[in-house]
Amino acid sequence: MKKTVIGGVLTLAGAWLTGCIFVAAALFVPNMSTWQGTRLWYAIYGSGTYESVIKQSMALGVPFTAGVLMFALGLVVLGIEYFRPEENRRAPAGEPARPSSTSASAASPSAGLSESGSPPEEELPTMTKITQDDGQERI
């Protein structure tokens, strides 16, 4: 569960950061007079180190790349947690491990047990068939 939260936070933070930079660049594009290549990418990344004469870019390439990497890393963590088999997951510290489905007390620890802790000798009714006192089976 902790890794799922970490993956979700990374994904949301990366999406938020990247989205805010896209919006800022889109608002900045009409104010640009010169550019090279695509206006939006030029507004985000700029042309390089020799742009000291006329600053026509926002130079947000590093935070934009960090946001994309955070988004991708968060998706990878969420994907790993989604496809991990249930038996390979560890119970968090302080919580007992979940009982396996093959144990006799999987539904609840005391369901159907006598005082000695052994299962009763008669068969327990299931959810599909319950015989009433009048002899009719009901579901």
Image (cartoon, rainbow, N blue to C red):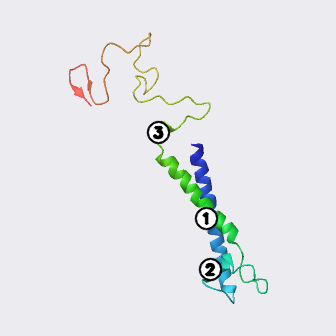
On residue 127, the disc is none
Give percent across and percent down for residue 50.
75, 82
Work out whether 83 lies above or below 90.
Answer: below
Give percent across and percent down for residue 79.
50, 52
Give percent across and percent down for residue 46.
69, 79
The residue under the point 52% across, 47% down is 81
The residue under the point 46% across, 41% down is 85
Mark 2 residue type = Leu
Contact? badges 3 and 1 (CB < 8 Å): no
Q: Which residue is mark 3?
A: 86
On residue 68, the disc is 1
Quarter of the N terminus within the rendering? top right
- Quadrant in the rendering for residue 122: top left
Taking depth in this image into account, of 94 and 38 the one nearest to the observer is 38
**Label 1 to label 2, Cα distance in Å?**
16 Å
Left or right side of 24 for 105? left
Q: Which residue is mark 2?
A: 40
Taking depth in this image into account, of 94 and 59 the one nearest to the observer is 59
Which secondary structure lies at badge 1?
A: helix
